[in-house]
Image: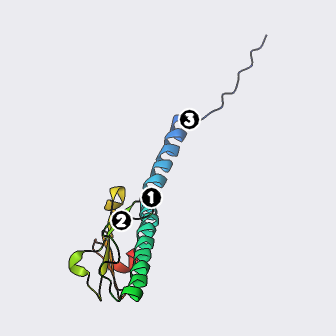
Amino acid sequence: MKRRMRQQTGFTLVELLISVVIIGVLSAVAYPSYVKHVYKARRADGLSAIMDMAQRLERCKTTTFSYAGCIDDGEYSTEGYYYLTLPADELSATAYQIQAEPQGAQAEDDCGTLKMSESGKKYALGSADVDDCW
């Protein structure tokens, strides 16, 4: 009686290690890009909240002829990633600056605190370029 040898199938250890290395390299390249994309998406929440507050200030000024007293200071953006304030030293009858400070995990964003004035001038107080943040 002849025994038939079964042919074994599967992966060798070398093939498995090569696969793990390839996955590691791909994830090391993709993760930083993913994190930047998440920060950018969260930043849109803060920018939207700044624009909303600016519109409310402008509507109030058309009826009261002053920005002062239009909005109670301090509110969170829709998703809660930014806290918006109107610093008292930058609020007058004719001028304002809305400041959006990142909260929680968003505080690690390179743009840092975002600001906008009544003239539409935009600021980013972090290490990133203003154009990249807005």
Residue extending farthest front? 64
Residue extending farthest right? 1
- In the displayed structure, 21 sits above or below 96; it is above
Q: CA distance from mark 3 to mark 1?
A: 26 Å
Counting residues from the start of the chain, the first of labels 1 and 2 encountered is: 1
Q: Of the numbered discs in the image, which one, if any, rests on residue 12?
A: 3
**Which residue does the image show at 43% across and 64% down from the upper left?**
42
- Depth order, front residue of 35/4: 35
- The secondary structure type at the circle numbered 2 is strand
- The secondary structure type at the circle numbered 3 is loop
Determine which residue is flagged by label 2: 75
- Depth order, front residue of 54/70: 70
Quadrant occupied by the C terminus: bottom left
- In the displayed structure, 7 sits above or below 65; it is above
State which mark lies toward you, 2 or 3: 2
**Which residue does the image show at 39% across and 61% down from the upper left?**
81
Residue extending farthest top? 1
Quadrant occupied by the N terminus: top right
Amino acid at dot 3: Thr
Amino acid at dot 1: Val
**Quadrant in the picture for residue 68:** bottom left
Determine which residue is flagged by label 1: 29
